[in-house]
Image (cartoon, rainbow, N blue to C red):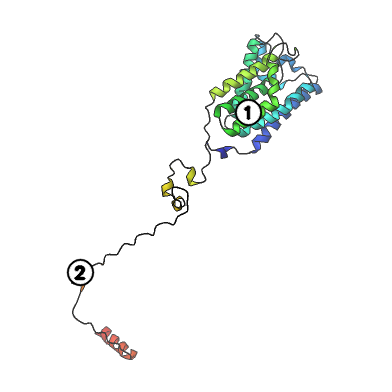
């Protein structure tokens, strides 16, 4: 895969903004019509709580909770759709399902809501996948994620804050790591611009390199050898010893009369 496959498209900005605006729209509906969507969150190890695997990332307890999740989602989703455009939708869908399922298995008996688990999926996938590819741009992206969101790792441990779902965070972190192994490692190669970058490059055939000797001193190219052309012998069949005499006629009327006489005959 060539590095010029990193292309900026409308999806890179449009999808993150649409996703976050949709979360705010859901919260507005809850406030405007006095809905209580908390019951649609993940309730671990219950049949009714299975619906939360799908719905929980779109439900938030208050505006502060929603605000804290909005900015990381915009940044991480934009990075995902730019650097992993082919895998982005699969990571988004399977990340929600896998992290939600793990939270349903290991979570406390309480409703687990919020897009925090999805954020941890994105952080985990972008970080570990960048290290796996060993491609300088993706490794740099991984380090950037560590700088921006490295402190989030503390919230995957219990008893840090009883008001947050550390189970959801841990499930998201594990899910992102698992997804890096399901998606094939992309091999990147640099775009070849010069002949000397090709693997089959031979400096002995390079006209420019031939102007230098073994010590790197500039030398003149040897003069090309001029091959004497062999004279082609003429076949004696095409030779004649008889002289050919051509007559030049100056009177054009004579030519016309001669031609008309030939036509009449």
Q: Residue at x 77, y 25 (%)?
A: 67
Distance in Å between CA atoms under marks 2 and 1: 81 Å
Q: Which residue is mark 1?
A: 142
Residue 119 is situated, as x and y percent measured from the top left of the image, at 67, 23
Q: Residue at x 65, y 12 (%)?
A: 104
Q: Quadrant of residue 159?
A: top right
Residue 89 is situated, as x and y percent measured from the top left of the image, at 60, 28
Q: Is residue 107 left or right of residue 187?
A: right
Q: Along the line of sight, which residue is nearer the eye, 134 or 41?
A: 134
Between marks 2 and 1 in the image, the one whose residue lies nearer the viewer: 1
* SS type, badge 1: helix
* SS type, badge 2: loop
Q: Quadrant of residue 87?
A: top right
Quarter of the image for the C terminus: give it: bottom left
Residue 115 is situated, as x and y percent measured from the top left of the image, at 70, 22
Q: Quick check: 205 above or below 62?
A: below
Q: Do callouts 2 and 1 mark residues in contact (Cβ within 8 Å)?
A: no
Q: Along the line of sight, which residue is nearer the eye, 49 or 229?
A: 229
Q: Is residue 84 visible?
A: no
Q: Which residue is mark 2?
A: 235
């Amino acid at each position: 895969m060539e590095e010029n496959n990193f292309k900026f498209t409308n999806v890179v900005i449009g999808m993150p903004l649409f996703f976050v605006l949709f979360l705010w729209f859901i919260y507005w509906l809850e406030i405007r019509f006095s809905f209580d969507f908390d019951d649609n969150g993940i309730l671990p190890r219950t049949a009714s709580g299975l619906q939360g695997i799908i719905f929980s990332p779109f439900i938030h307890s208050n505006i502060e909770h929603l605000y804290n999740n909005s900015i990381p989602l915009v940044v991480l989703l934009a990075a995902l759709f730019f650097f992993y455009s082919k895998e982005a939708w699969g990571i988004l869908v399977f990340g929600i399902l896998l992290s939600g399922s793990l939270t349903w298995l290991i979570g406390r008996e309480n409703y687990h809501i919020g897009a925090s688990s999805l954020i941890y999926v994105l952080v985990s996938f972008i970080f570990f996948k960048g290290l796996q590819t060993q491609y300088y741009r993706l490794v740099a992206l991984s380090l950037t994620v560590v700088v921006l969101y490295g402190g989030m790792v503390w919230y995957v441990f219990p008893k840090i804050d009883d008001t947050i779902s550390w189970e959801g965070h841990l499930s998201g972190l594990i899910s992102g790591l698992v997804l890096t192994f399901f998606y094939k490692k992309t091999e990147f190669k640099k775009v070849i611009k010069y002949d000397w970058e090709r693997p089959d490059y031979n400096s002995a055939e390079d006209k420019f390199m031939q102007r230098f000797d073994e010590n790197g001193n500039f030398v003149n190219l040897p003069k090309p050898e001029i091959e004497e052309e062999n004279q082609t012998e003429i076949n004696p069949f095409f030779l004649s010893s008889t002289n050919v005499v051509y007559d030049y006629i100056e009177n054009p009327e004579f030519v016309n009369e001669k031609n008309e006489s030939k036509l009449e005959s």
